[in-house]
Image (cartoon, helix red, strand yellow):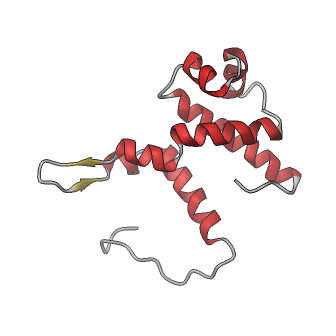
């Protein structure tokens, strides 16, 4: 993530970190997350439940750790499935709002400031 320059951007980073923590909670226990993040279970629980927001610096460090655990690439590789005929089945991906949210943020940051005039899809009804 880029260094936030405004209060709104810092708050957005802190909230996105909480979303990533909630996604991680689906795969890991608080104890496992605590050992990976070096944060107490109670602190992680308060963050995940929305009782407390991490400060900006802690959000940045937590983001880096959580991105490796449940970031877009990790989640996509975890959800990729092929049917018996060898065709890619994207049902598990398009039904996962965490992946869709991360993908939209990735696209937004990748193409921000550029003029996008066309989108290519694999099928006519692909979008």
Name the quadrant containing residue 44.
Answer: top right
Name the quadrant containing residue 87.
Answer: bottom left
Q: Position of residue 43 (x, y in %)?
A: 73, 20
**Number of marks in picture:** 0
Residue at x 69% of width, y 76% of height: 113
Q: Is residue 120 left or right of residue 68?
A: left
Q: Position of residue 75 (x, y in %)?
A: 45, 44
Q: Is residue 85 left or right of residue 80?
A: left
The image shows residue 30, relative to residue 77, as above or below, that is above
Residue at x 62% of width, y 64% of height: 108
Q: Is residue 80 left or right of residue 22?
A: left
Q: Position of residue 19 (x, y in %)?
A: 62, 38
Q: Residue furthest left?
A: 85
The image shows residue 56, relative to residue 27, as above or below, that is below
User: Depth check: 74 or 85 in front?
Assistant: 74
Name the quadrant containing residue 121.
Answer: bottom left
Residue at x 82% of width, y 41% of height: 56
User: Depth check: 50 or 114 in front?
Assistant: 114
Residue at x 50% of width, y 24% of height: 28
On-image quarter of the C terminus: bottom left
């Amino acid at each position: 993530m880029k260094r936030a320059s405004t209060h709104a951007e810092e708050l957005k980073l802190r909230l996105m970190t909480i979303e990533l923590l909630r996604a991680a909670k689906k795969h890991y226990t608080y104890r496992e997350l605590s050992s990976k993040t070096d944060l107490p279970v109670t602190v992680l629980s308060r963050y995940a439940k929305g009782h407390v927001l991490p400060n900006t610096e802690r959000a940045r460090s937590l983001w880096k750790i959580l991105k490796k655990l449940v970031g877009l690439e990790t989640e996509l590789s975890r959800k990729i499935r092929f049917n018996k005929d060898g065709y890619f089945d994207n049902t598990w991906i398009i039904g996962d709002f965490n992946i869709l949210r991360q993908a939209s943020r990735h696209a937004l940051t990748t193409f921000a400031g550029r003029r996008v005039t066309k989108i290519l899809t694999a099928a006519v009804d692909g979008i």
